[in-house]
Image (cartoon, rainbow, N blue to C red):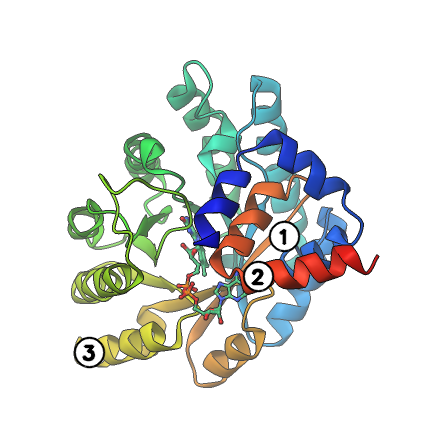
Amino acid sequence: MLGPVILAASRSDKMRRFVSAAPGTKQVVDRFIAGETVDQVIPIVEDAADKGLEVTLDVVGEDITTPAQAEAARDAYLELIERLKVLDLGPRAEMSVKLSMFGQALEGGHELALANVRPVVEAAAAIGTTVTLDAEDHTTLDSMFAIHEELRKDFPQTGCVIQSYLFRTEDDARRLAAAGSRVRIVKGAYKEPASVAYQDKAEIDKAYVRITRILMEGAGYPMIGSHDPRLIAIAQELGRQTGRKLDEYEFQMLYGIRSDEHVRLAAEGHRMRVYTAYGTDWYGYFMRRLAEKPANLLFFGRSVLTK
Ligand code: FDA
């Protein structure tokens, strides 16, 4: 029951101020956030590459309120891409973006987000890599999928995320499982109403399996975003059943979560991509990580109390 309460707190400015100022917060945040600056994240990308891991980089931020902030988000990604150019990792270091950070919720937001994200996708393509559009709450998804479709006209490798907790997602998966597409399936991290989403964990997991099957049977490139050992084993089995080679799909996990498993799957010959978030506006991202595993809250509480 704690998860939904934490997710509600993730939208509260009062809680944002409290959590950000609490002593001990930084220690817990550091587990999930790879650094505050591009200078701090680059060595982490290099270290991952040395271990045979790939990365998708997320400059944290969402729910911005001015067009200038959306442009700043665009520029932060462009700066990151400049730095990645030197590492020459190609598609082994890609970007994940949240369209809300590019202005999607502002007036004229759909066009604004598209205008801001396009140069990022262009710059990524110029260094031989790609961008994946994260899935946010359900009210933003029609716009996200339309932007994805628009970007794919010029940059067919642009990826997107679908969430197994939403009723709509099996249909989205069928539409997206076409040649050349890159689709990340995740369970879903937002607080969604029962009118649009399964609330029961078992139902969400069953949907995840059905959707993974659709993606594996399709002609696109499935990206399995989960730390759940059972779902990972099922995805491996579905990969075998559908005759996919190990490089014809990939696993993805979050920085700081089940890190041993990242290395183990890579050593088995799988493509393993670590979603590596960095930046200063970490509050929303951090609170979703707490909500996914309320035991993290105990750790957080202990850390705050012992400071
Ligand atoms: P589950 O929550 O059942 O966790 C399985 C096990 O993993 C847990 O028992 C625990 O051991 C470990 N674990 C999971 N979360 C943890 C945490 N926070 N702290 C510590 N341990 C944890 N969501 C979304 O709505 N839109 C998006 O675009 C994305 N993008 C995305 C990218 C990638 C690469 C991943 C892995 C996940 C996302 N997500 C996301 C988040 C996703 O929706 C989901 O909330 C989390 O992945 C947790 O679900 P699991 O599948 O890991 O299973």
Which amino acid does the dot numbered 1 rest on? Leu
At 32% across and 79% down in the image, what residue appears? 233
Q: Earlier in the sequence, mark 1 or mark 2?
A: 1
Residue indicated by mark 3:
243
Circle 3: element type? loop
Q: Quadrant of ligand 1?
A: bottom left
Quadrant where the C terminus is found in the figure: bottom right
At 28% across and 37% down in the image, what residue appears? 149
The residues tagged by marks 1 and 2 sit, at their Cα atoms, a distance apart of 7 Å
Query: Mark 1 near mark 2, Cβ–Cβ under 8 Å?
Result: yes
Q: Give residue 193's mark.
A: none
Circle 2: element type? loop
Residue indicated by mark 1:
84
The residues tagged by marks 3 and 2 sit, at their Cα atoms, a distance apart of 28 Å
Mark 3 burial class by Cα count in 10 Å: few <14, some 14-19, many 20+:
few
Which amino acid does the dot numbered 3 rest on? Gly
From what the image shows, is residue 196 above or below residue 306?
above
Mark 2 burial class by Cα count in 10 Å: few <14, some 14-19, many 20+:
some
At 58% across and 18% down in the image, what residue appears? 66
Q: How many numbered markers are drawn?
A: 3
Q: Give residue 89's mark.
A: 2
The residues tagged by marks 3 and 1 sit, at their Cα atoms, a distance apart of 34 Å
In this rendered view, identify the residue nearer to me: 157 or 210.
210
Mark 1 burial class by Cα count in 10 Å: few <14, some 14-19, many 20+:
many
Q: Earlier in the sequence, mark 3 or mark 2?
A: 2
Which amino acid does the dot numbered 2 rest on? Leu
From what the image shows, is residue 243 above or below residue 294?
below
Q: Which corner quadrant of the image does residue 77 belong to?
A: top right
Q: Position of residue 9 (x, y in %)?
A: 54, 40
